[in-house]
Amino acid sequence: MKISLTPEQAFQKIKQYCAYQERSHQATKEKLFSMGLYKKDVDILLSQLIEENYLNEQRYALRFVGGHFRIKKWGKIKITAALKQQRVSSYNIQKALDEIDQNDYLTCLQQLASVKWNTLKKETTLNKKVKATNYLLQKGYESNLIRTAILKLQAPNET
């Protein structure tokens, strides 16, 4: 049995939900609907949350990008896809991605490539290339950057 909250009760709960950690507008909207509220009430509460700065899409995008890049070592493609899934605007996604230092990004990619390459000791060079490339594509890195990173790993006599 799903209990319905009044908009006032829901607002108190949703403020705590948003204060605990950055949330996307989409996740917050879904949470409000799960509390048994109607669309009109949800829209009003979302506006209030934005006005009181509990919800801020740009701040959410920045935190999401920072965390997923630094901690999970995701590439820009995977981060973008995840944020689009949360219905974050393209403008805020791009602004947040611009905060990633390009040198840090390339260093991270090179480290991931190197670690993966070294775990494939028994593989042929071609298999190493394929497996390392697939791994880095899954992590969300751009194929042209992956190609460059893998070329740096190949010893001159392996090409």
Image: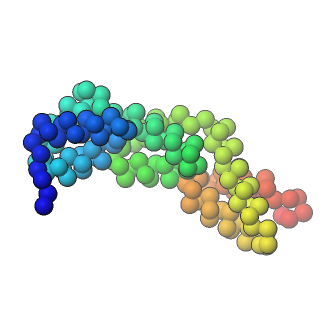
Q: How is the image coloured?
A: rainbow
Along the line of sight, which residue is nearer the eye, 114 or 143? 114
The outermost residue toward the top is: 52
16 up-or-down from 68: above or below: above
Residue 22 horizontal side relative to residue 39, left or right = right
The quarter of the picture where the C terminus appears is bottom right
Would residue 55 be seen by someone viewing this image from the given angle? Answer: no
Where in the figure is residue 65, as x and y percent of width and height? 49, 41
The outermost residue toward the right is: 157
Along the line of sight, which residue is nearer the eye, 53 or 133? 53
Along the line of sight, which residue is nearer the eye, 150 or 62? 62
Residue shown at the point (30%, 47%) measured from the top left: 27
Residue shown at the point (20%, 52%) measured from the top left: 34
100 up-or-down from 29: above or below: above
How many marks overall?
Answer: 0
29 up-or-down from 102: above or below: below
- Which quadrant of the view contains residue 48? top left
Residue shown at the point (46%, 48%) measured from the top left: 80
Where in the figure is residue 110, as x and y percent of width and height? 71, 49
Where in the figure is residue 130, as x and y percent of width and height? 68, 68
Where in the figure is residue 76, as x and y percent of width and height? 53, 47
Residue 33 horizontal side relative to residue 95, left or right = left
Residue shown at the point (41%, 47%) measured from the top left: 83
Residue 109 horizontal side relative to residue 66, left or right = right
The quarter of the picture where the N terminus appears is bottom left
Would residue 80 be seen by someone viewing this image from the given angle? Answer: yes
